[in-house]
Image (cartoon, grey):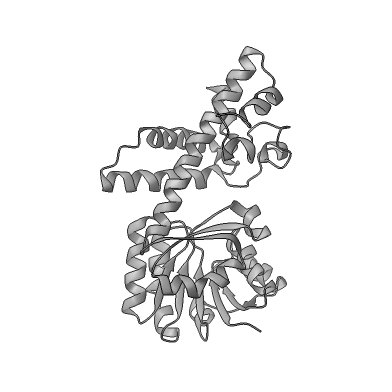
Amino acid sequence: MKETIGFIGLGNMGLPMAANLAKAGYDVQGFDVVPAANEAGARLGITVRPSAVEAVKGAAIVISMLPNGKLVLELYKSGILQAARAGTLFIDSSTIDIESARAAAVLAVEGGMNNLDAPVSGGVGGAAAGTLTFMVGGGAEDFARAKPVLEAMGRRIVHCGDAGAGQAAKICNNMILGISMIAVGEAFVLAEKVGLSHQALYDVASTASGQCWSLTSYCPVPGPVPTSPANNAYKPGFAAALMLKDLRLAQEAAAAAGASTALGKHAAEIYENFVAAGQGGVDFSGIINAIRNG
């Protein structure tokens, strides 16, 4: 048996991530505030603990996957730093704002712990398949210590810089993703209106200068990429509400840094309208339907 890992947050992303650690031979102590998530974790080889505090006891590494920065900071202030043994490495894989990530790192260090921010890209499918990309912020020694554990959950592990750098990389990446999906959706809608087939546009753009991940991996129309959510009634995947969250984080960072992100701002507005129309649970590639109706 490998070292013990505490895992807090067994939701859509956290549960398959923790399950992959268990499959890799780690002793995973998990906890979620939702009883059904704990029950699902127990079925997947996770030792469920009655609280976050209990989940960190005896763990060499603690991973958290939570919805927002406020909850991460509340977790770090909840007593888990006092319950963990000195020198435990805390890895937060939530997607949160940069300032909260840096504040969490300060709390961890002040509590005698080590810390990394390590948000992920790849969605629920990548979490289940163990093919996530981890964008990591923190010290080089902590990164080296964490890498074997992260490799049990992901395919590509990138050290982006000091505390908060992982979150910075994540929101920049997802701003590109949100903008590019809108562009791809607009192109397919234009093609429909001028009589060009979906397959013809895909065959050209996927091997020409329009090539991008939103087209070749997540094509927003059924057919050209059989594994894309468009072939499954836009079931996520990566929900539009989560895309909106990341685009808002990018805009918060841009405002704080004085960066001009006109397309990022417009993408956030487009997804905000999409979510407000009740489409937050739809895959973010479903934005093409809003474009058609616009």
Tell me which residue sits at (66%, 70%) in the image: 41
Q: Quadrant of residue 19?
A: bottom right
What is the x, y in percent for residue 140?
41, 70
What is the x, y in percent for residue 129?
68, 58
Q: Quadrant of residue 264?
A: top left
- Residue 84, above or below 281: below
Judged left or right of residue 181, residue 1 is right
Tell me which residue sits at (25%, 43%) in the image: 258
> Of 236 and 281, which appears nearest the observer?
236
Tell me which residue sits at (62%, 15%) in the image: 193
- Residue 86, above or below 5: below
- Residue 58, above or below 250: below
Task: Count the numbered circles shown.
Answer: 0
Quadrant of the rendering where the N terminus is positioned: bottom right
> Of 209 and 253, which appears nearest the observer?
209
Q: Quadrant of residue 222?
A: top right
Q: Point out the residue furthest to the front here.
A: 208
Judged left or right of residue 288, residue 221 is right
Judged left or right of residue 254, residue 86 is right
What is the x, y in percent for residue 40?
68, 67
What is the x, y in percent for residue 260?
30, 37
Tell me which residue sits at (38%, 67%) in the image: 73
